[in-house]
Each structure stands twice: as C-alpha cells, then as structure tokens.
Amino acid sequence: QVHLVESGGGLVQPGGSLRLSCSASGRTFGTYAMAWFRHASGNEREFVAAISWSGDSTYHANSVRVRFTISKDNAKNTVYLQMNSLKPEDTAVYYCAARSRPWAAITLHEYDYWGQGTQVTVSS
C-alpha cells in the first residue's frame, strides 16, 4: 500500500508560479512511476505529467509543456510539479498518482494509488 499526500496548492495570479509536492509513504517509493493529473469543474480528470521510477523519463501534456516540470527525489520519497506562467485554465484540483511499475504512463486507469488532491486557483 502507498499513501500519497499532496501540498503546495493555493491561489495565484495569472503568470505566477506554484510548486506542488507529493509525499509518499508505504512500500518502496523508488520502484514506482509517478504522475500528476488534474480535474477542473465540468471536465474529466486529465493527465498533466508523469515520471519514471528512475526519473530518466518524463512526459508532459501538450497543454502544460514548457510551463510545467515534473521531478522526483527518491531520497525524500517526494515528487514535485513546478508550475510556471500559470493561466486561469490551469485552475483545477491536482492529484498525485503512483503505479506499481517502473515506467511511466499517461492514462489514469494505469495508476494504482491516488492522493486526496490539492486545489490550484489561477485568478486575478
């Protein structure tokens, strides 16, 4: 079992930055691929970014590429999402996810564990 806890969300103005963190506990974190998804009101939950267990491979949705960066620190059992140049359309609840495979995936059904989510609101 893996327990995930997100933090770092909040209210930010357009063009601003936030860094989300996801702290993992439970089974060996280093063998799990991790990802971030988001769910905006009225939309389905969508893929944002993913990273392999080694950290060598990362994937970002087209809508956030260049602006967002996923990274991880296995020593701290933590995955991060650095979000720059935020737009109002980035407003959503952001969820951290883990899958019991070393390679990353971009569809939500491939992830086994989920955090409770953290709200990100981009508004002036």
Image (spheres, rainbow, N blue to C red):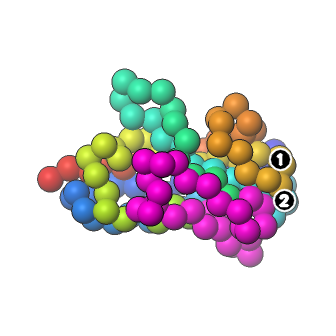
Residue 4, x across and y down, in percent: 65, 51
The residue sitting at 28% across, 52% down in the picture is 87
Report the residue that reaches farthest toward the front. Answer: 62
Q: Is residue 23 visible?
A: no
The residue carrying pointer 1 sits among few (fewer than 14), some (14 to 19) or many (20 or more) residues within 10 Å by Cα, namely many
**Kind of residue at badge 2:** Thr
The residue sitting at 27% across, 64% down in the picture is 16
The residue sitting at 41% across, 62% down in the picture is 67
Q: Which residue is mark 1?
A: 100
The answer to whether residue 124 is left or right of residue 55 is: left
Q: Is residue 7 above or below residue 111?
A: below
* Mark 2 secondary-structure assignment: helix
Q: Are marks 1 and 2 in contact (CB under 8 Å)?
A: yes
The residue carrying pointer 2 sits among few (fewer than 14), some (14 to 19) or many (20 or more) residues within 10 Å by Cα, namely some
Q: Is residue 45 above or below residue 115?
A: above
**Corner quadrant of residue 66:** bottom left
Q: Is residue 96 above or below residue 66?
A: above
**Mark 1 vs mark 2: which is more N-terminal?**
2
Residue 50, x across and y down, in percent: 63, 53
Q: Which residue is mark 2?
A: 31
Magenta part of the protein: which range? 52-79
The answer to whether residue 105 is left or right of residue 64 is: right
